[in-house]
Amino acid sequence: MTQQARTSGNIRFFQAPTALARKVKRPGGMWREQAIAEAVRLLEGVKQDCLDELDVLIGGLEAIHADSALSRKEILDRLDAAADTIITVAGTYEYVDLVKAAMCLGDLARGLQTQEERSSGLLRIPLDTIRLLSPKAEPLDEASRDRLLEGLYSLRQHIGVVPDGTVA
């Protein structure tokens, strides 16, 4: 491996070529547009499997919320982790409203951990909203989706949780 050096004043910088830098100089690579098109093609190839798993995960939210064997903290932690996964998968396939609802669930789960006196029954609202916005659910018109999300935002504001899950 060769290193390139450059000098700036009294400081000498050494830059070792990365594996990517070496590959770019070799023929046979792929142009950026080709790589993006290939990535999109691969994502579309697994989309149905991902949406099926997303549906299972959304169905599992109810089980987590109702699991009497778990402590309140464990329920909130698991709901927060599930919300994060929903955000990732739904975001990949551009289910924007579902991402927003899952973000609210995560915010509420984190916020409720610091508010012991609050009932976790408040989580019914984001759980139901996520179920209604699921890719496998009956599609809602835009006005209905907007009302659902506004309700989540109002709930989040009502209990004093800001979008990062901290309590205001």
Image (spheres, rainbow, N blue to C red):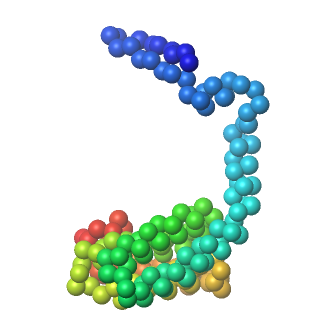
The quarter of the rendered structure image containing the C terminus is: bottom left
Q: Is residue 13 left or right of residue 162?
A: right
Q: Does residue 70 lie above or below 99 as drawn?
A: below
Residue 80, image x, y percentages: 41, 71
Q: Is residue 127 left or right of residue 134?
A: left
Q: Does residue 94 lie above or below 121 as drawn?
A: above
Q: Is residue 157 left or right of residue 133?
A: left
Residue 121, image x, y percentages: 36, 89
Q: What is the quadrant of residue 77 in the picture?
A: bottom left
Q: What is the quadrant of residue 144 in the picture?
A: bottom right
- The total number of labels drawn is 0
Residue 39, image x, y percentages: 69, 51
Residue occupying image coordinates x 63% and y 64%: 93
The quarter of the rendered structure image containing the N terminus is: top right
Residue 23, image x, y percentages: 66, 28
Residue occupying image coordinates x 70% and y 63%: 46
Residue occupying image coordinates x 65% and y 86%: 138
Q: Is residue 161 left or right of residue 139?
A: left
Question: Taking the image as drawn, is residue 78 in sight?
Answer: yes
